[in-house]
Amino acid sequence: MNMGYEVELKHIEKYYGSFKAADDASFGVEKGQLAGLLGPSGSGKTTLLRMIAGLEKPDKGEILIAGQRVNDIPARHRGIGFVFQNYALFRHMTVRDNLAFGLRVQNVDSHTIKVRTDELLELTGLSAVAKRYPQQLSGGQRQRVAFARALAPNPKVLLLDEPFAAIDAKVRKELRSWLRNAIHKLGITSLFVTHDQDEAVEVADKIIIVNRGQIEQAGSPLEIYQTPQTPFVADFIGESVKVPDYTLFKGFADNTKGAHMGLIRPEFIELAKDAKEISLPVGAEEGVVKATYFRGSNMAVDIEVRGQILRAARSLEKEPLQVGDKALAFIHRIYSLEAGQTRIIENRAKQRESVVI
């Protein structure tokens, strides 16, 4: 076992009847790390989180917290703080009383409770609303109350189930940054569940990709994005177009028989109005613009090349492309998806260019 792991799952399996919600799932989260369990709906993310919390019991495998096996330890004795998706605040209690509830259950003395709740109210910026009730708060404030209440008993680990799901888009973005900063300031090991890859990339130190109860890949956001290890991860992360046979494109011909499935991301494609605007015109494909979309920092452009609609990004500083325009597309690289593995293939025109230089 890696002694740096504060939370570790080893070969976890969980069944609900004939449905396998966790399938030989193994991963670790280091002390003080903020990890995101990311995957599509129904992939098993929340089941894994609830098993760590002790709210569900695995049928097979081990769960360790701070090196201790906790499979048979009740949830209340695991040192876990849990923030539920719907906050689960006590409506009849003020903000301060919500924060103090867990401490009172533990028979903590009133002076210590006041000191601790004062600390948490300041940390979460809720001091001014300490006497209000949950229904008098905004969604963002309720989320902070739930966060502070989970922290009150000084848990070893903090678990959050889709913590931003019930908050509107603008407030959600602000809370992402706030939550990340607060958790790093406290140094508490944390895991959160999300199906939003932008959220995972922005908030997490480590992303754990879950699919059909299995762990597809775990690593930093940069590692996950740049070096996906499986076809699922390559397709799930980022924006990409799946092509049935990438050998049809210039620079990617292959003598082996059969189709070669691939993925092409927008940043893999260089678009140009003519040969003078493109870096390697010899490797460029001719295409026709089918659609354009304003994305704020750039224009997304759908271009048809060899019967395949590809998506590329074009800088706003360049002359805009219109639907129906002929354009050139140079595909720098492609993800090959064969035999259950993912690898990057560079356009051969770039290899020849580097030899000439």
Image (spheres, rainbow, N blue to C red):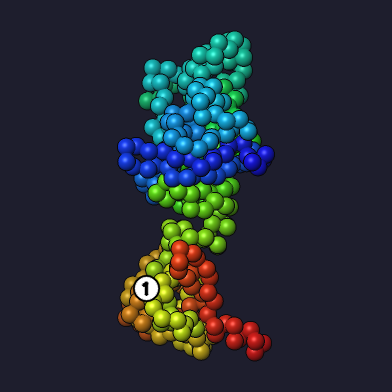
Q: Nearer the viewer, residue 98 or 160?
A: 160
Residue 195, given in percent of the width and then of the height, sits at: 42, 48
Residue 23: quadrant of the picture: top left
Q: Quadrant of the N terminus?
A: top right
Secondary structure under tag 1 reads: loop
Amino acid type assigned to the residue bearing label 1 in the image:
Pro
Q: Nearer the viewer, residue 357 or 129?
A: 357
Residue 20, given in percent of the width and then of the height, sits at: 37, 43
Q: Is residue 75 above or below residue 50?
A: above
Residue 325, given in percent of the width and then of the height, sits at: 35, 82
Q: Residue at x 52, y 53 (%)?
A: 217
Q: Residue at x 37, y 80 (%)?
A: 305
Residue 220, given in percent of the width and then of the height, sits at: 58, 52
Q: Residue at x 46, y 58 (%)?
A: 233
Residue 8: in sight, yes or no?
A: yes
**Number of numbered discs on residues:** 1
